[in-house]
Amino acid sequence: MKVAISNSRPTIFSLLAFSLLLVACSSNLATERQYVPAQNLMDVVKDFQRFAREDVYRFPIAKDVTGVNVMKAALVRLDDYERKNPRQFIDIIQFSRATAYERLRDYDKALDYYHRVADIDGPLRPQALKNIEALEAFKAVLDKPLPTEDPFVYLKALDERVESWNGLVKKYQGSPQEYLARVEEEKVDRAKVAFVEANRFRLTDGNHITILAYSQLVTKHRQSKNYYRYLLDFGDFYVRLAKDYIAENDPEGLAFDMKIYGQLEKQGLNLYTEVAGVDGIVEKIEAQGKIEALRGLSDKVRRLSR
């Protein structure tokens, strides 16, 4: 998603670029660049700048040339640069740290470093203040305690938290904070499904409610980077139901109904197959393994039920 930027004020990244132009590139880089310590601040933040505005709801945080999370790598390299170059570009370093912690959803540390930038009368201060306001709104949602005495009251509180995050998604639309708010909203939606699944035997028609919860999760978060993970989890639940049915009804006995088992197996297989058919995702191999395991179970059940 591209965000229109007003020409009346520079972006954070133009400010960073302007500041970084002041740093001399004095050393030659070795062929194995990823193993060479950062020689200037541009080396430290170049990949970080590129990915800091990426949609962390739809896409995983990018990796650097060594295969390490860009945000985690930036924190290490910023520490190294500051240790070797004390009292240089303090506001840029602190702002970059704050941004990295924010993208990693460590809001306490992000706020700490944004406050340090806000205490400096520099070009990054206005943006730091805006980010502080956003993260304080995040903290207000996260710090509100959830009641644990009654499961239905707990679920209601989760629904209210989802509404709060959705409000922040709308408020910060088009900014990195929108993506973070979507991640937090998604996290609560997944927690609701996990809670219902864990308590399904205590709920009237708990299995059906769990299936409905999974259906809502995969529908709502179809654009999420975790979508295929949720499909696998949904398939796992159907397989669990199939195994529960086997445990309650011996396939060699007269009470076993192959049609009931087959319906549950088919639902799980369809979800696994959907994931296995998508190239370029990390869940593909896992899905293929689950398909083979389910087919093995199915063959065994069919032999026993004859």
Image (cartoon, grey):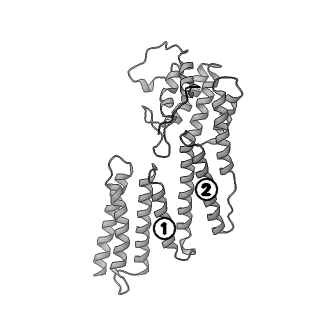
Check residue 265 in the rendering and tell me which mark sits there, or answer none: none
Disc 1 to disc 2, C-alpha distance: 19 Å
Between 215 and 86, the residue placed more toward the observer is 215
Amino acid at circle 2: Glu
Can you say which quadrant of the picture contains the C terminus? Answer: bottom left
Between 200 and 79, the residue placed more toward the observer is 200
| Residue at left offset 59%, top offset 28% | 79
Label 2 Cα neighbours within 10 Å, binned few <14 / some 14-19 / many ≥20: few
Q: Residue 115 in the image: x percent, y percent?
A: 69, 33
Q: Nearer the viewer, mark 1 or mark 2?
A: 2
| Residue at left offset 49%, top offset 26% | 46
Between 70 and 52, the residue placed more toward the observer is 52
Q: Residue 121 in the image: x percent, y percent?
A: 70, 23
Disc 2 element: helix
Q: Residue 212 in the image: x percent, y percent?
A: 48, 67
| Residue at left offset 31%, top offset 62% | 292
Residue, disc 2: 163
Marks 1 and 2, the one that precedes in the sequence: 2
Disc 1 element: helix
Q: Residue 7 in the image: x percent, y percent?
A: 55, 26
Amino acid at circle 1: Leu
Are the residues at dot 1 and dot 2 in contact (C-beta closer than 8 Å)?
no
In the image, residue 254 above or below residue 148: below
| Residue at left offset 61%, top offset 23% | 83
Residue 122 occupies quadrant: top right
Q: Is residue 97 left or right of residue 238?
A: right
Residue 118 occupies quadrant: top right
Residue, disc 1: 212
